[in-house]
Image (cartoon, rainbow, N blue to C red):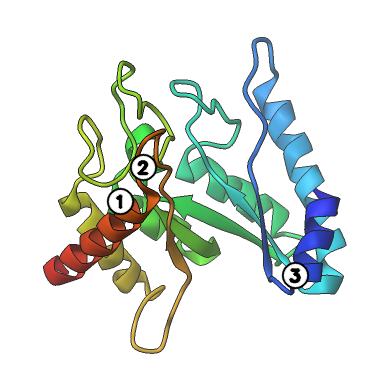
Amino acid sequence: MKVGIDQTAQWGAKHCGSVSGHITVGLNIEKAKELLAESFMELCEYAAPSCITLCIENFDSIHFVKNCLIGSAKGTVQLEEKVRTKYENFGIITDLSHYPLLKEKTSETTHLVKDFLAYLQIGNCSLNPHSPYYGDIHPYFGASETNVSIEMLADFPRALLEIGYLGKDNRGIVSFEIKPLEGQSPYAQIAGCKLSLQRTWDMV
């Protein structure tokens, strides 16, 4: 991670992202969370002289592909609060595609993490274990057997407007995250994202 922080500084960027480790059989989860908080404190101290905010992205835990130690929004906020007792340069990356995987509601989750948001990603996912898009694969919007609808997509900017992350005087960082499967055109998927975004703003 320190190498990644050094690279972030060299590129002139201000955020460096990370995820937690995997949950494994026999893992003492509470002890692992304590050690993770200590590690992030050390990394935040290392990143501070370069004015870099270290960020954690929460993923699914247990049921899907990533099985990460830090999954739910509530658990992520608890980690944030613990690290921020000593270091302010710690934030959250949240991804719309993770909300269905975590069985979380868009507005509720976005309001919960609002005080720690560094930036956000918009993606799609599938809860169908027989789908090639199962888990955190980031298929295009409208792909069969996926779980982020246009209506859910529209709920995201609504929530961001409500918490003040987006607005007349606020331009928070929001990006799409998509991953074409073999044989799929990345250009078509980028165009599809732009179309979905336009439809979303029309609904908002």
Extreme residue in the bottom direction: 169
Question: For the residue labelled by badge 1, is the local secondary structure a helix, a strand or a loop?
Answer: helix
Residue type marked 3: Trp
Residue 93 in the image: x percent, y percent? 53, 55
Left-right relation of 132 to 52: left
Left-right relation of 204 to 175: left
How far apart marks 2 and 3 lie (CA) works out to 31 Å
Question: For the residue labelled by badge 3, is the local secondary structure a helix, a strand or a loop?
Answer: helix
Residue 113 in the image: x percent, y percent? 47, 57
How far apart marks 1 and 3 lie (CA) works out to 33 Å
The label shown at residue 99 is 2
Nearer the observer, disc 2 or disc 3? 3
How far apart marks 1 and 2 lie (CA) works out to 7 Å
Query: What residue is pinned by disc 1?
Result: 106
Residue type marked 2: Tyr
Residue type marked 1: Thr
Q: Are marks 1 and 2 in contact (CB under 8 Å)?
A: yes
Q: Is residue 81 above or below residue 76?
A: below
The answer to whether any part of residue 141 appears in the image is yes
Q: Are marks 1 and 3 in contact (CB under 8 Å)?
A: no
The answer to whether any part of residue 44 appears in the image is no
**Of pointers 1 and 3, the one earlier in the residue sequence:** 3
Question: For the residue labelled by badge 2, is the local secondary structure a helix, a strand or a loop?
Answer: helix
Q: Residue at x 43, y 66 (%)?
A: 174
Give the quadrant of residue 193. bottom left
Within 10 Å of disc 1 (Cα), the crowding (few <14, some 14-19, many 20+) is many
Extreme residue in the top direction: 26
Give the quadrant of residue 171. bottom left
Q: Is residue 116 above or below residue 22?
A: below
Residues 96 and 81: in front is 96
Query: What residue is pinned by disc 3?
Result: 11
Q: Residue at x 31, y 73 (%)?
A: 161
